[in-house]
Structures are given as structure tokens and as C-alpha cells.
Image: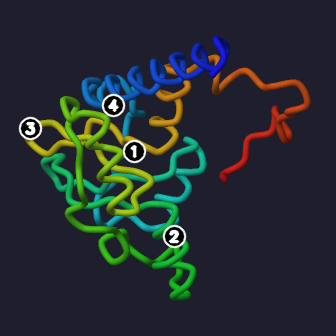
Amino acid sequence: MSDAGDEYSESLEAEFRKLEDALLSDAVRLLAPSEPIRLPADATVEQAVSQMVDNRRAAVVIVDNEGHLIGIFTERDVLTRVLRQRRDPERTRLADVMTPDPETLTADDRICYAVNRMYVGGHRSLPLVDGGQRPLGIVTVNDVTKWLAGIFPEAVLNLRPGDRLKRPLEVDSG
């Protein structure tokens, strides 16, 4: 193998070690999850969707009168539990369409655990809670992606000649 090949292999190996170290040691708090939108269980789907759209969020958390997490309502729930079932968003209460007692993360959980929970459970958003089960944030796949881009800024943010971004200034919901 040439010196360039050896150098490339060593560089690649170093990058993988860097990722492994970060995954195993970095805590979820480094993902800087967004402040959650908290709604009561008797709020309507229309209210939740309005909040989600206005704040560019993929989910809202449902809390009881003491502020404890009792559920989560996501974009996927809008599609599968509201639209697909032909429910009226103005009349349907979140209690009827939320995911009760959702999987949660804490700020001290390792990022590898968050990735595992998202992958195994098929989640794109997970509530971040304190010791009293009060929502502190929502960890999203986007949060993990931003974290990865911070670890590998050259590989993720630099495009090779000929690569181009599709509509770079346009933000969609995909």
C-alpha cells in the first residue's frame, strides 16, 4: 500500500475513534435540545398543530396540572391518528391521540443511548426530562445531526467540487 493509502487509512481510523469517543462520552445536554411546547391533555389537535407550525417544532409534550410529562404528540401522530382516521382537529383532544407515557431521556444520558432509543423505537423526537419527569426539552434527529456536523465539520459541511445543495435557502419539513 502506498504512503498516501496508509495516511488515508490512519486518518479514517482516527475519525472513527473520534466519533466512538464522542458517542460513548458526550451527554445528551450537548445536543442543545429546544425548549418544549407544553400543552394540557384537553388541548385540541388544532391548538397543538398551530403551536408546532408557529414554532417550527416536530412535537409538543403533554403535561398534567403539576407539569409532569404524560404524553407526546408528534407530526407522525397528526398523520396516523388524526388525518388517517378522519378526526376533526378542532374537536379532537390531545388525550385521544397522543402517545402516553413516552420513552424519555435525561440530560446525563449518553448520546449513544439517545441514538439507540431513537433507532430501536423508530422515534424522531424524544422528550428530555428532569428527575421529577418534568419536560426540559425535546431531542430530535436534527439535534443529533447538528452534533455530528460539529464533530466532523469538514466532512459534513464542505462539499466536493460538483456537489450542490438542493434549494439551500429554502427550509422544508422533510
- Identified at 82% across, 32% down, the residue is 169
Q: Up-down: is 163 above or below 36?
A: above
The mark nearer the N terminus, 3 or 4, is 4
Q: Which residue appears farthest toward the right when viewing the image?
A: 162
Query: Residue 134's image quarter?
Result: top left
Residue that label 2 marks: 78
Left or right, residue 29 beside residue 160: left
Q: Distance between the residues labelled 1 and 3?
A: 19 Å
- Identified at 78% across, 25% down, the residue is 159
Residue that label 1 marks: 37
The mark nearer the N terminus, 2 or 3, is 2
Which type of secondary structure does the marked residue at label 2 adopt?
Answer: helix
Q: Distance between the residues labelled 4 and 2?
A: 32 Å
Q: How far apart are marks 3 and 4 (CA)?
A: 23 Å
The mark nearer the N terminus, 1 or 3, is 1
Residue that label 4 marks: 23
The front one of 80 and 123 is 123
Type of the residue with mark 2: Val
- Identified at 46% across, 23% down, the residue is 13
**Can you tell which of label 3 and label 4 is closer to the viewer?**
4
Q: Up-down: is 143 above or below 18?
A: below
The mark nearer the N terminus, 4 or 2, is 4
Residue that label 3 marks: 131
